[in-house]
Each structure stands twice: as C-alpha cells, then as structure tokens.
Amino acid sequence: MNNIAALIQGEPDAPFWDAWRDGERFLLHRCGICGRHEWPATCCIEYGLSAMEWVEVPATGVIDSFTIFHRAYTKELAADVPYTLAVLRLDEGPYFHTRITGIAPESIRIGMRVRLRRGTGDSFPLFLPE
Amino acid sequence: MDHFGTTSEHLGAGAVQLRQHALHRPDAITYGQPITLEDHQASPMVVEPFRMLDCCRDTDGGAVFLLTSAARAKTMPGVRPIYIRGMGFGHNIRNWHGRDVYAHHDDVAPAAARAFAQAGIMLDDIDTAQFYDPFTISIIMQLEHYGFCKSGHGGPFVADGGIALDGKIPANTGGGQISGFYAAGFTPIIEAMKQLRGEAGAMQVKNANIALSSGHGLNGGVQNTWSHGTLILGNEP
Ligand SMILES: [Zn+2]
C-alpha cells in the first residue's frame, strides 16, 4: 500500500507509523496530565498539546461497528474481497479503523474482542479475533 | 441497522420510491427507468448494507442559483424569488471526543433547532423535504433525526409510502441524488426551489410553500456523523 508512505511524511502521526514499521509496536497519543489516550494524534481537550506523548499499548479492543466490502476500495485489496472493515474501540478508549483478518466476514459480530496481528509484514496494523 | 432492525428491504423501498419520483423527470439520470424491490435485492452488494441500487452515481452537469437580498430579488425581471426563511448548522465533534460518534448524530438537532427558530415554524409546517441522500439510508436517518417519524422507524416509514407524493412528508421528489442527479448540496436546494415555484411537474407537491433542504458531510460524514446543515426555504419572505 504505497499510500501509507505518503500518509506519514511529515505528519503528526509519523511516530505511530515509524514504530509500527520498525518494530511492529503499536502507539497511542496520551495526555501526560489526565492520562487519556487518543488516536490519531491530537491535543487533549482539557490540557492542550504540551503533555501529549506517544506510548506503547497492547492493542486490544472490541468491534464497535463493521462493514463488509464486496468490491475492493483499492486495487491492492482486490484479492482480499470480501473483506471486513471495522471500527474498533481500543481498550484504552480511542476508535481505531482497520481490517479484521483471520475470520470469515459473516462470522464477525459487534462486541467481538480483537487483538493486533503481528509477524506477517503488514504495512498497516490489522487485527484478528482474540 | 443493528440497533433498530432496519432491513435491506427497507433500503430497497427507498430506492424504488426515488426511481418512481424520477420517472417523469427528463433531467433525472434515471428518467423513465423504474425499478422493483426485486431489482434492488438482485443488484450486487458493494459495501454492506449498500447494494449498487442504494448508491448515487457520479453525474456530469451543473447547477446554479443566485443569492441576493430579498429587496433586490423583487426588482429582477422574470424572476420568481425563493426566500431563505431559516438556516442552521451543527457538527458532531463533541461526540467524537466523547467517543460515541457513530451511535449519536447530534449534528442534526442544533442545525434544525436554529433553522426552525429563525423561520418561526414547526415541523408540521414543512410541505416537502429535500434531503441530502447519497445512499438510501440517509433519508431514513434524517426522517428520524428531524422527527418526521420515531427513532428507528424510518425504514418502515419509507416502505409505507411516507415520502411519496401523497405521503406524510413528500421527500426527494426529483429522485434525489440517487435517482435524480448528484450535484452535492445543489441537488436538494434546486428541487426545493422547483417545488416552491410550482415547477416540479408530475411530482409537484400541492400548495408547497415551505421546504426543508439539508446537507451533510465531511470525513465520512455522509450519514450525518460529522456535520449537518438545515435550510428552510419559502416562496414568501
Ligand atoms: Zn489530558
């Protein structure tokens, strides 16, 4: 997915993508004062930008909503059709939008627990059922 | 749909209704091309729950309206002015930060409240509604959010003919963006103007004096999740 490279160039989220690419570490943006986690990079709505820091988290959560793509959104995904795109609610709080792998799309349910998939060279962090 | 039990057949009823509306409109992309619920159910799934016939299509075309003061509009020869009676805007960023953005769409409520207050009217005063409708679900959700039907009842409301010409609230009478033409926010505004001018032909709403026109979008916000605008238009100031 070539668009990932363009996405991270000089962007506030660059530390997230760098950590994922370099060591499959999953980071969230956290406010050091109130402890609230955020994704994507943002200011704390209470304390602003000064205390925001990138911290590694386990990357687990539940499926908040999902849909099944029967046509590929980009040609790189053509071989994966049908695939599932989900809105996750990470255990630290923020939403994270990604694909769910390792399960037939028709078996996926809202509320299902999921975890990060590692070790398969994914350019974007994908998830699978716990 | 998970919350309320809205079905693909409910979406299909909307698609069929919009085609019916566009049937007699030579400027509609689906002019003279009715569909049935069976056609809808047989059309290929694109991204669930949307089949091909739930989606609008790219349209090449143009739309224009001139905006000026009411006083000046009255002096322009050959023009039947349409008046902005009220307008309002709302966004949903609070629910993003509150982490409830997908289940709640608070952007419609403030937009509608301000627009209706400016216009000095109630929901019952609306003669026709022209909703931003890139997908069939958009109409169902807005019917609920504006209060034309109860929350979760938008699907059955449409299936029971609620947005038909003789329905409780004739809506998207030109076929909307799905069956009429997709010109972003121009589509509902132009159709509202046609209705208020009495230029809607076979789909003319009787005694159409006040119309609601909506717009929404931004960042995947097509289903009202992100921002919403309400426009109340009238053929009298
Ligand atoms: Zn904070």
Image (tube, rainbow, N blue to C red):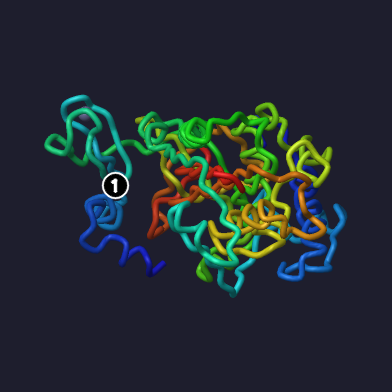
Q: Tell me if B227 is positioned left or right of A49 in this view.
A: right
Report the residue at 83% width, 42% height from top.
B166
In the picture, residue B175 is in which quadrant? Answer: bottom right
In the picture, residue B164 is in which quadrant? Answer: top right
Q: Pick whichever, B81 or B44, lies toward us.
A: B81
Q: Chain of mark 1?
A: A
Q: Position of residue B107 (x, y in %)?
A: 47, 36
Q: Position of residue A67 (x, y in %)?
A: 60, 47
Disc 1, SS = loop
Q: Is residue A100 visible?
A: no
Amino acid type, mark 1: Arg
Q: Is residue B124 visible?
A: yes
How many numbered marks appear? 1
Q: Quadrant of the N terminus of chain B?
A: top right
| B217 up-or-down from A48: above or below | below
Q: Pick whichever, B103 or B153, lies toward us.
A: B153
Q: Which residue is mark 1?
A: A25
Q: Pick whichever, B105 or B52, lies toward us.
A: B105
Q: Tell me if A81 is positioned left or right of A89 in this view.
A: right
| B1 up-or-down from B204: above or below | above
Q: Position of residue B121 (x, y in %)?
A: 58, 31
Q: Pick whichever, B124 or B1, lies toward us.
A: B124
Taking the image in four quarters, ligand 1 sits in the one at: top left
**Disc 1: CA contacts within 10 A as few (<14), some (14-19) or many (>=20):** some
Q: Quadrant of the C terminus of chain B?
A: top right
Report the residue at 42% width, 32% height from top.
B95
